[in-house]
Image (cartoon, grey):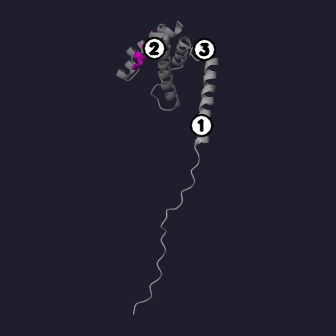
Amino acid sequence: MQPPQPDPVPVATTAPASPPRRPFGPLLAALVAGLVLGGGGVGAVWALSGGDGDSPGRGPAADARDACTALDGFDETKYGTKGKKGEVAINRYYAANTLATAAAAGDKRYKPLAEAIRGSQYRLADELEFTAKVMKELNKARGFCDDL
């Protein structure tokens, strides 16, 4: 004699109901409105401030002055040293190059400054220390700054 068999477990034959779909219309409308209003606000600020990069105090001349300020604060004896003084030296040296390059892009009169700073950096990469050749280029840039 066999033991009694339990009743079979009922199996669901239908898929569970999916959650109701939320309408995306209001969300999409809010997103578009935010983009339009935000873009309009940025555009208004840009238009009111001049928006061309040459607002008072800015532009190639200001970039050249800022490059010279960074170069003036650069101490080549600290370049490559460990710690904060070394970090400051490296960043000022490369900031001077970036600013001088920006100035030269806006006004060709600043091209000699950019070329001298870049030349000193190229020489430094070749020489690996501030040799007379590197200092010649660096001093040329500093001379240009003295004339600003």
Q: Earlier in the sequence, mark 2 or mark 3?
A: 3
Residue 28, by quadrant, is: top right
Q: Residue furthest front?
A: 14
Judged left or right of residue 15, residue 31 is: right
| Neighbours of disc 1 within 10 Å: few (<14), some (14-19), many (20+) | few
What x and y, as percent, mark residue 146? 53, 8
Residue 64 vs 31, above or below: the answer is above
Residue 124, by quadrant, is: top left
Please tell me which residue is depicted at 56% across the width and 50% down the height of the picture: 21
Of circles 1 and 3, the one toward us is: 1
Callout 2 secondary element: helix
Q: How many marks?
A: 3
Q: Earlier in the sequence, mark 2 or mark 1?
A: 1
Q: Are marks 1 and 3 in contact (CB under 8 Å)?
A: no
Q: Is residue 10 visible?
A: yes
The amino acid type found where label 1 is placed reads: Leu
Which residue, given by chain and number where applicable, does mark 1 sit on?
31
Residue 110 within the segment the image draws in magenta: no
Q: Which labelled disc corresponds to residue 114?
A: 2
| Magenta span: chief secondary structure | helix
Of circles 2 and 1, the one toward us is: 1
Which residue, given by chain and number where applicable, does mark 3 sit on?
55
Residue 113 within the segment the image draws in magenta: yes
The amino acid type found where label 2 is placed reads: Ala
Callout 3 secondary element: loop
Of circles 2 and 3, the one toward us is: 3
Q: Is residue 143 visible?
A: no
Q: Earlier in the sequence, mark 1 or mark 3?
A: 1
In-front residue for pair 29/116: 29
The magenta stretch is 112-121
